[in-house]
Amino acid sequence: MSGLSAVEQAEINLSVGAVVVSNYLSYLTMGIVLCATWVYFLKFPTDRWWFKALVVLCVSMCICDTVATGIWTYDLAVANYANPAALAFTHWAIPAEGFLMATCGLTVQLFYAWRLWMMSMKNNWILPVVVGCLSILGWCIGCWTVHITATHKLISDLALLIPGVYIWLGVSVGADVLITSSMIYYLDLRFRVKPDKDYRLQRRFRKLIVRTVECNLLSLFVQAISVGLFNRSSVGLCFVSMDMTLVKVYTFSLLVSLNCRHSDNGPGTSNGGFSSSRGGRGVELTVLHTSSFPSTRASQI
């Protein structure tokens, strides 16, 4: 370090230091995801196989993301420490992380789109289609950024991603706002207009709303900070502190949504669900053991 100029030392601190701290955050959020995954399999051992497959897929992407960024951190902070030349080139972990982030985000948002369709008694297909289209568009933009980072070897070439990054942020915000507002309508506002007498059911619905809103706000907060830091070249690679956690944030949102259900192993449950009926109108609200969300269906009694 003694042979480096002050400018080079500052560049190393902004780059290597940012990546190392970001890697610590990556490990921290990975641990949180693993704990939530353990809770899920403990609470719902007989859940649908494709729910379990979805969890395994997203957690596997989190593990791959953590391993890739860990290798990048080692190469930058250990193998090439105090080597300014290494800071000028992109690492293979950057496009790999971008692809995992885009794919995990697409997976979780499509899950929420399907969830909204079920909440509408399979009647409102327009809203899930809009959410799905926004999610697919965001994934396509993510793949474009992966292509740019994979074909351009210099860190300075990341400036080419700025227009696409803003579009990606707008698409993600749009999808999350639609998901959150739709859940508030289906699980809260609709029952305020036509109140249900089962207050336990309403409390569970509102708990699900609160958890979903919290997770969506967390993901929006992380995305906004990432984009803001990415657009400021003076902070070096500080933007990766958010990027290294986004896959875990998406997966945590999925796990929180699944874990909010009534547990298979909980007292007073039947097939992991609960129901209530409204007077003579015979409208039954059921949270199925096979679903992670309330499905409202009409039945004649």
Image (cartoon, grey):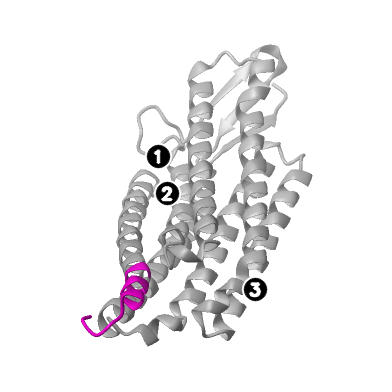
Q: Is the stretch drawn in magenta largely helix, strand or loop?
A: helix
Residue under numbered circle 3: 144
Q: Residue at x 75, y 51 (%)?
A: 129
- Outermost residue on the front side: it is 6
The residue type indicated by label 2 comes to Thr
Asked if 151 appears above or below 26 in the picture, the reply is: below
Q: Is residue 289 visible?
A: yes
The residue furthest left is: 2
Quadrant containing the N terminus in the rendered view? bottom left
Reading the chain from its start, which is encountered first: label 2 or label 1?
Answer: 2
> The C terminus lies in which quarter of the figure?
top right
User: Badge 2: how crowded within 10 Å, few (<14), some, or many (20+)?
Assistant: some
Q: Which numbered disc, 1 or 3, marks the residue that appears first in the sequence?
A: 3
Given contact means CB atoms under 8 Å apart, are the residues at marks 1 and 3 in contact? Answer: no
| Along the line of sight, the residue nearer the viewer: 266 or 103 | 103
- Pointer 1 residue: 264
- Which mark, by number, is residue 253? none
Secondary structure of the residue carrying numbered label 2 = loop
- Amino acid residing under circle 3: Trp
Q: Position of residue 256 (x, y in %)?
A: 44, 44
Residue at the spot x=52%, y=69% of the render?
98
**The one of 177 and 276 positioned closer to us in this rendering:** 177
How far is mark 2 from mark 1, CA to CA?
8 Å
Q: In which quarter of the image is residue 299?
A: top right
Report the residue marked by disc 2: 46
Q: Is residue 47 visible?
A: no
SS of the residue at dot 1?
loop
